[in-house]
Image (cartoon, rainbow, N blue to C red):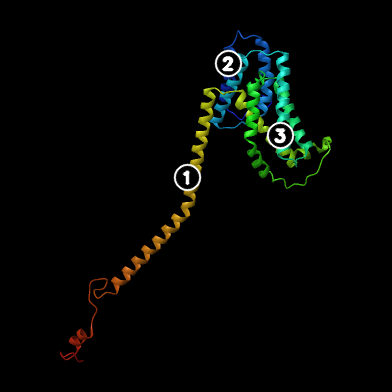
Amino acid sequence: MARSPAPWPDAWQREYLDTIRRVVSAHPDAAQYADRLAILSNGFQLYWEGLQKGQDRSLFEVHCAEIRWYAECLMGAGFRGEEDTHALRCQYEGLFHHAATSLLAQFPFLDPNAVHRAEADHLAECYKRIDAPLLPIYLEPFSLNQIERIKQRWYDLRYARVDLWRRLGGGQSPQVQHPAPAPSQVKASQEHPDYLLAQRSLAQLQAHIWAVGASPPDYYRSAVANQIDGHKRRFQSRIEAENQERRLPRAILQTEQISFLLGALLETARSSTESSPGGADGNTAPTGLDSGAEGGDGHGRE
C-alpha cells in the first residue's frame, strides 16, 4: 500500500488495515499460521495492483468486505500440500486449454497463435496466484463436478462471445498468420483483434470459475448491493439534473414570451384608455356644438 498508495483518507486506510488485522487475530490457532501470513503478504501485492480504487465510500466498503472474505478463507481453509498445488495447476491448464480449443472451433478464422498467446498470458497470471493463493479460487483443487460445471457455463455463454466478436469489429481485420512475436512485437500482437477476442473471452472463463468455485458471504453481497443502489441513485440524480438543465432554456423562453405578451396587452389597454371619450383624466373632448354655443348665435352657427 505504501508503494502504490490508495487515494483514500488516512482514516479509511486504517479501517482497511484493521479489517485485515481483526480476521488474522481471530485465528491464532490456525495450522501453519506463519505460512498463512506469508501467503497474505505475498498475495496481497497481486491483489492490490488490480484493485480499482477511488473516493467512492460504497466502493471502499466493497473492498473492505472483499479482503475480509479473502482473509477469512485463507485463515480458515485447510492448508494444501504440494500435491494439491500441482493438481490445481493442472486443472487450470486443462480449463484454459479447453476454452481456447472451443474458441478456435467456434471462430475457425482466428489466428491460433494469437489465441494460444492469450491462453498463455492468462495461465501465467494463474500460476502466480496459485503460488500465493490469497484469492479463494486458488486455495484448493476443484472437484470433478465443479470442473464440469465450469465447462458447461463456458458452453452456455457461447453467444456472449459472438457479441464480443461483433463489438471488436466482427472479424473484418485481415486474417494473417503471425509467427511467434519478437519482444518488440509483443505490444502490437496484444492489440491484434484475434488476441483481444481470445483474451477477453478467456477473462470470462475466470468469472465462471468464481461462480462455481467460491460462494461470497452475505456481508460481501450486502456491500455490493449497497454500491449498486448508490450508483443507481447517483445516476438518477444526474439524469434529473440534466433534464432540468434542458428544460431551463425553454422555461426562460416561455417566460420571456409571456412577459412580452403581458407587456403588449398592458400597452394596448393603456392606449385604448387614452383614446376613449372619457380620456385619461375623465374629461370629455370638446365638440363643434360646444364651440358654437360659446362663440355663435345660439343656433349652432358661428
Which residue in the structure is indicated by mark 3?
Answer: 102
Pick whichever of labels 2 and 1 is earlier in the sequence: 2
Mark 1 to mark 3: distance in Å? Answer: 46 Å
Crowd rating for badge 3 (residues with CA inside 10 Å; few <14, some 14–19, many 20+): some
Answer left or right for 72 relative to 201.
left
Q: What element carries label 3?
A: helix
| Res 272 quadrant in image | bottom left
Mark 2 to mark 1: distance in Å? Answer: 42 Å
Q: Please tell me which residue is depicted at 49% across the width and 49% down the height of the picture.
A: 245
Q: Please tell me which residue is depicted at 54% across the width and 25% down the height of the picture.
A: 220
Q: What element carries label 1?
A: helix
Answer left or right for 211 relative to 86.
left
Residue 240 is tagged as 1
Crowd rating for badge 2 (residues with CA inside 10 Å; few <14, some 14–19, many 20+): many
Residue 23 is tagged as 2
Q: Looking at the picture, which amino acid does disc 2 mark?
A: Val
Q: Looking at the picture, which amino acid does disc 3 mark?
A: Ser
Crowd rating for badge 1 (residues with CA inside 10 Å; few <14, some 14–19, many 20+): few
